[in-house]
């Protein structure tokens, strides 16, 4: 079948079922622009169809929902059935992040772009082992270097937004109401950023190897 024939066939498809078929096989949120290009429809028409489908699934009380996350659309199991899904996927096995990893990820999320040295200074411990774990998990990524020191900077990824169920970083909750002295604490800590040996083992690395 030629490209022209394929294009004609796609144009003849009903939009809603075509969107469902495509979204069933995506492994990351699909943008409206990409879906419009694939299905050869105007973006506005695709966006309207996606929102109509999302509303339809909610009204029907389906076990899944269509969500706009990290700039794209994807199917997710509905939160009300999280226990059933967790039982099936994990089947008694847990692959949760350690407390050390969660704390490090939080620092990156709220201070990005940020270097390992600054993250270590905020936490007060060497975070190199934890950062390697977060990189391997795809939750953080390298994002250039700090002009003054040349240190590698890190930011969170779209996968982080997807896992957190956020459309963007602006949806992160405000820290000030919960930690009113956070800025002062960090300022005091950063007066002298400690020098850490990246290869030196510490309790954080031990946690990563046993709990992650």
Image: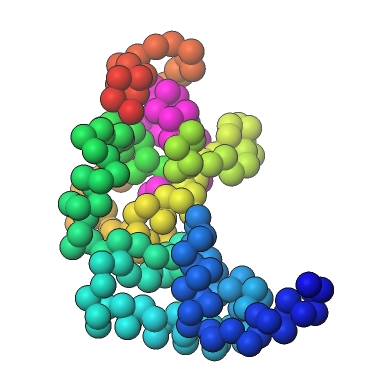
Quadrant for residue 171, please give it.
bottom left
In magenta segment, residue 189? no
**Nearer to me, 90 or 2:** 2
Q: Which residue is drawn at 50% across and 46% down?
A: 155
Indicate left or right for 187 with 181 as reference.
right
Q: Which residue is drawn at 48% across and 41% down?
A: 138
Q: In which quarter of the image is the C terminus?
A: top left
**Nearer to me, 199 or 22:** 22
Indicate left or right for 158 with 106 as reference.
right
**Nearer to me, 127 or 87:** 87
Q: Residue at x 26, y 72 (%)?
A: 62
Quadrant for residue 80, please give it.
bottom left
In magenta segment, residue 121? yes
Q: Which residue is drawn at 61% across and 71% down?
A: 34
Range of magenta residues:
109-134
Measured as percent of width and height from the top left, residue 41 is found at: 63, 85
Measured as percent of width and height from the top left, residue 167 is found at: 41, 65
Specify the principal SS of the magenta part: helix
Image: 30 above or below 39: above
Q: Quadrant of the N terminus?
A: bottom right
What's the image's color scheme? Answer: rainbow
Measured as percent of width and height from the top left, residue 43 is found at: 59, 83
Extreme residue in the front direction: 1
Quadrant for residue 209, please give it.
top left
Indicate left or right for 27 with 164 as reference.
right
Image: 180 above or below 144: below
Q: Can residue 6 be seen in this view?
A: yes
Measured as percent of width and height from the top left, residue 158 is found at: 49, 54
Number of marks drawn? 0
Extreme residue in the top direction: 200
């Amino acid at each position: 079948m030629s490209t022209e024939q394929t294009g004609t066939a796609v144009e003849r498809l009903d939009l809603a079922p075509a969107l469902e078929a495509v979204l069933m096989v995506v492994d990351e949120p699909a943008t409206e622009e990409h879906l419009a290009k694939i299905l050869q429809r105007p973006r506005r028409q695709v966006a309207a169809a996606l929102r109509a489908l999302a509303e339809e699934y909610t009204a029907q009380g389906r076990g899944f929902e269509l969500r706009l996350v990290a700039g794209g659309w994807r199917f997710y199991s509905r939160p009300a059935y999280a226990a059933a899904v967790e039982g099936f996927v994990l089947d008694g096995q847990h692959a949760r992040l350690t407390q050390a990893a969660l704390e490090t990820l939080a620092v990156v999320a709220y201070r990005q772009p940020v270097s390992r040295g600054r993250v270590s200074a905020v936490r007060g411990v060497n975070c190199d082992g934890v950062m390697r774990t977060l990189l391997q998990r795809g939750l953080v990524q390298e994002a250039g270097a700090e002009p003054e020191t040349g240190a590698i900077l890190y930011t969170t990824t779209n996968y982080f937004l997807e896992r957190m169920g956020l459309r963007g970083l602006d949806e992160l909750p405000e820290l000030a109401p919960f930690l009113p002295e956070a800025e002062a604490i960090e300022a005091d800590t950063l007066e002298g950023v400690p020098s850490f040996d990246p290869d030196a083992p510490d309790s954080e690395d031990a946690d990563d190897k046993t709990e992650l």
